[in-house]
Image (cartoon, helix red, strand yellow):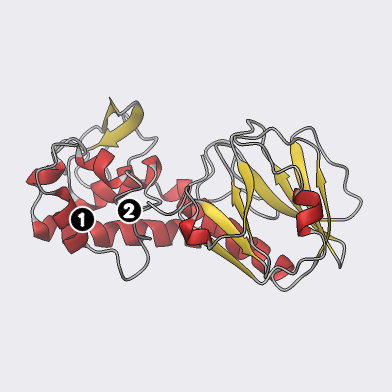
Amino acid sequence: MPELPEVETTRRGITPYIEGQTVKRVIIRQPRLRWPVPENLEQTLKGLRIQTVSRRAKYLLLATDAGTLLLHLGMSGSLRIISDGQTAGKHDHIDFIFADEIILRFNDPRRFGAALWTTEPAEQHPLLKDLGPEPLLEDFSGDLLYELSRNKKTPIKSFIMDSHIVVGVGNIYANEALFMAGIHPVRQAGKISLSRYQKLAGCIQVILRQAIEQGGTTLRDFVNEAGKPGYFQQQLNVYGRTGLPCIRCQQILKEIRLANRSTVFCSDCQR
């Protein structure tokens, strides 16, 4: 599933092609995504100029002077920049065609993605208004995590993956950040000290920045705007390495299921 680094990689990739450009037309081949594509989206977007391309959590926000298009990649979606004339495939559900004949093509084999329209301020949209802070911005810190965690019996891995606490710390990146911080994934969130939360917040930021620099992580479906995979999987220290030696102590890495998600850790290095 595309997480924050993959979505941010996509945002950076498509922005130079569509920001400031005018939508010439929209082709909707499959309107039944996670939520139905608005029936009048083709008419609504035609002639509008994309003023900015931003990201909130895992949502891409294409702002115009009439409203904002919200795009979500779901579990297997991707946005690709292609040239006019490239034949659409089975899972190419939406084309956004711009005046210079550049096409932003939305591909989603599992159809868990979304294309929604709002005329209200994007931050007030029901899908966005209750989200936690962005982990790479100033309002995220170890102090905040510590305050929110008091009296919480939730495992720390589940706690940092809660989008109401902080957005964008998906399963892969939670595994990696907890290993870097030396924190056991099942430790209760409310029993972790302030100093350890400060370290964990820094590790979350380091891991996410590294992943963005490498173009995200491709384990199955993700590709960027040019159709290329991400390369952060080559730097994973624990995720996907069950049964292999820990890079620090050589202890064999263990795997458990936590909230039905694969959780890999070193029982010696993580306490």
Left/right placement of residue 188 relative to residue 112 reads left
Instruction: Tell me where residue 44 sits by quadrant.
Output: bottom right
Residue drawn where x is 70% and y is 44% of the image: 38
Provide the residue designation for mark 2: 166
Residue drawn where x is 37% and y is 51% of the image: 130
Amino acid identity at mark 2: Val
Secondary structure, mark 2, is loop
Provide the residue designation for mark 1: 145
Q: CA distance from mark 2 to mark 1?
A: 8 Å
Residue drawn where x is 87% and y is 62% of the image: 101
Is residue 3 placed above or below 22 in the rendered structure? above
Q: Nearer the viewer, residue 239 or 208?
A: 208
Secondary structure, mark 1, is helix
Instruction: Tell me where residue 25 sits by quadrant.
Output: bottom right
Left/right placement of residue 108 relative to residue 179 reads right
Whether residues under marks 2 and 1 lie with C-beta atoms below 8 angstroms apart, the answer is: yes
Left/right placement of residue 9 relative to residue 137 reads right
Q: Sequence order check: which comes first, mark 2 or mark 1?
A: 1
Task: Report the number of numbered marks.
Answer: 2
